[in-house]
Amino acid sequence: MRLLPVFLATLAVAAPVAPKKPEPQKPLTPAQKADYAKVVQPIFDAHCVSCHGPKKEKGKLRLDTLEATLKGGKNPTFVMGKADSSMLLSRVFLEHTAGDAMPPKAEKALTEKQKEALYAFVEGQPIPDELAKPAMADTKTALAAAKTAAAEPKAAPKAKK
Ligand code: HEC
């Protein structure tokens, strides 16, 4: 049996978990692109782009355009239709006090509606109106709060303890 060692060697190579190739991303449908522009990008603009945009690229990740978001950072962000293996969603859905949670715990957390809208989007479903509307309202509130905070005079620096 001269072939057996060859066969076994092949098995040994094939059996261990092969390094996962990033899955190819299917082009988004026009409806998905519209959802992204209307609901998802504003969430990222309000909560993520300060650290994941043109000024800072934490984790080598930018979330300021659809293209950049799909490209991902050190790791892929998500593949449409695979919400359960999405790195971006898992970090957004972490308990907000967890070390890896996004946005980090010092920042304002996303609301449930914003998170659910993100989930629906990555699942590849059209974001239903009853999620899109409150999510957009929450985003608006967050943006307004950020503007007010930026306009207020800076509090005197606290003395270090
Ligand atoms: C205050 C700054 C800050 C904000 C705001 C922020 N992040 Fe991050 N993010 C980081 C830092 C720092 C890292 C790199 C370290 C790490 O992976 O924890 C990171 C890493 C990540 C990663 C992993 C990147 C990779 O490929 O390894 C994802 C995904 C992510 N952030 C998503 C988000 C999302 C979504 C938001 C908004 C909802 C957000 N972040 C808001 C600071 C921030």
Image (cartoon, helix red, strand yellow):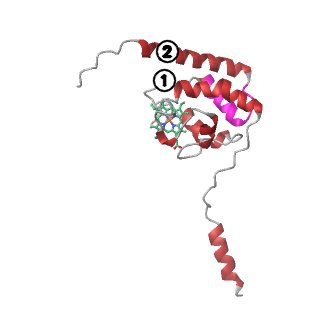
Three-letter code for the amino acid on which mark 2 is drawn:
Ala
Return the residue nearer the eye: 26 or 90. Answer: 26
Q: Which mark is residue 108?
A: 1
Three-letter code for the amino acid on which mark 1 is drawn:
Lys
| Relative image position of residue 54 (x, y in whole percent) | 50, 34
Q: Secondary structure at mark 2?
A: helix
Q: Is residue 97 above or below residue 84?
A: above
Do the CB atoms of the residues marked 2 and 1 lie less than 8 Å apart? yes
Locate the N terminus by quadrant: bottom right
Q: Is residue 11 above or below residue 117?
A: below
Residue at position x 75%, y 29% in the image: 126
Q: How many marks?
A: 2
| Relative image position of residue 63 (x, y in whole percent) | 56, 34
Q: Which mark is residue 145?
A: 2
Residue at position x 64%, y 66% in the image: 15
Residue 116 visible somewhere in the drawing: no
> Horizontal placement of 9 versus 108: left or right?
right
Residue 43 visible somewhere in the drawing: yes
* In the image, residue 45 lies in the stretch drawn in magenta: no
Q: Earlier in the sequence, mark 2 or mark 1?
A: 1
Q: Quote the CA–CA distance across marks 2 and 1.
A: 10 Å
Which residues fall within the magenta stretch? 113-127
Number of residues whose C-alpha sits closer than 10 Å to that of mark 1, classed few (under 14), some (14–19) or many (20 or more): some
